[in-house]
Amino acid sequence: MSTDRQVDRHAQFRAREEQIFDMAEQLLLDSGEGGMTLDTLALHLDLAKGTLYKHFQSKDELFLHLIIRHEQALLDLVLSSTGVFQELLLTYMQHLLNHPQRTSLLHQLEERLAAGGTGLTALFSDLYRVRKHRLRRIVPLTNTYLESINSHLSTRDYLAAIWAIAQGGSAILNSSFYQRYLGERDSLKQVLINQMIMLPHPQPPH
């Protein structure tokens, strides 16, 4: 019976943690980093502020948890994919470009935390472990795909280009200045994805 109660408490703890992280991400997207305070988070969740500290020790630690959750979602997409590289590329880029605000904010947060965050070493290790897991799945698929089309592009350069275009495209889609001139957002997303599909193909001689 004691074990059952422990299981229930653990499940309740995890469920509350998911609620905290979901609300924190929503507040971050709505109000930016400066507007996502722990007081506001506690108020929205109707929790004591001390309860929040049972799940993380600081706001920076909370932000890093959100980044890890995002990376885990990307890993889950990769692991659930059929293994067809083009489908994986489409899924990955759509995941980032369809949520440009989140993509840009989390990238900016990670850069700040990596440069000046304290007490985050263990969580950064968790983050990098998730990314390495994803790469162990992606790299062989990319190698096979590039070989199948006789591409001279290296796997490293191709994956770096995909990441850069997804991040850069997200920044443009999230920019209030560029949004005035974008017109149809979906067409820009499709252009960026098509560019990454065509990039490694050998160019015909002129």
Image (cartoon, rainbow, N blue to C red):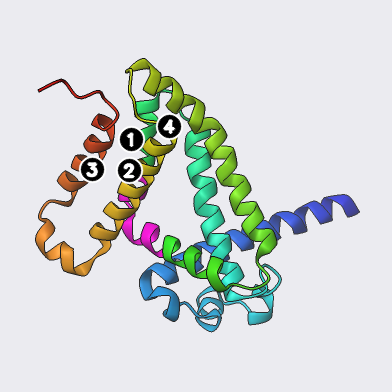
- Between residue 203 and residue 38, name the one nearer to us: 203
- Could you classify mark 4 by the number of other residues whose Cα lies within 10 Å: few (under 14), some (14-19), or many (20 or more)? many
- Could you classify mark 1 by the number of other residues whose Cα lies within 10 Å: few (under 14), some (14-19), or many (20 or more)? some
Could you give the CA–CA distance between mark 1 and mark 4, rounded to whole angstroms? 17 Å
**Which label's residue is closer to the chain start, 2 or 3?**
2
Could you give the CA–CA distance between mark 2 and mark 1, rounded to whole angstroms? 6 Å
- Could you classify mark 2 by the number of other residues whose Cα lies within 10 Å: few (under 14), some (14-19), or many (20 or more)? some
Foreground label between 1 and 4: 4
The amino acid beneath tag 2 is: Gln
Query: Which label belongs to residue 155?
Result: 4
Residue located beneath label 2 in the image: 94
* Residue range highlighted in magenta: 95-105
Q: Residue furthest right?
A: 2
Quarter of the image where one finds residue 116:
bottom right
The amino acid beneath tag 1 is: Leu
Query: Which label belongs to residue 90?
Result: 1
155 lies left or right of 137: left
Above or below residue 44? Residue 103 is: above
Residue located beneath label 3 in the image: 192
The amino acid beneath tag 4 is: Thr
**For numbered disc 2, what is the local secondary structure?**
helix
> Do the numbered discs 2 and 1 sit on residues whose CB atoms are within 8 Å?
yes
- What residue sits 47% from the left and 77% below the top? 36
- Verify whether residue 106 appears in magenta: no
**Which label's residue is closer to the chain start, 4 or 2?**
2
Overall secondary structure of the magenta section:
helix
Foreground label between 2 and 3: 3
The amino acid beneath tag 3 is: Leu
Above or below residue 64? Residue 81 is: above
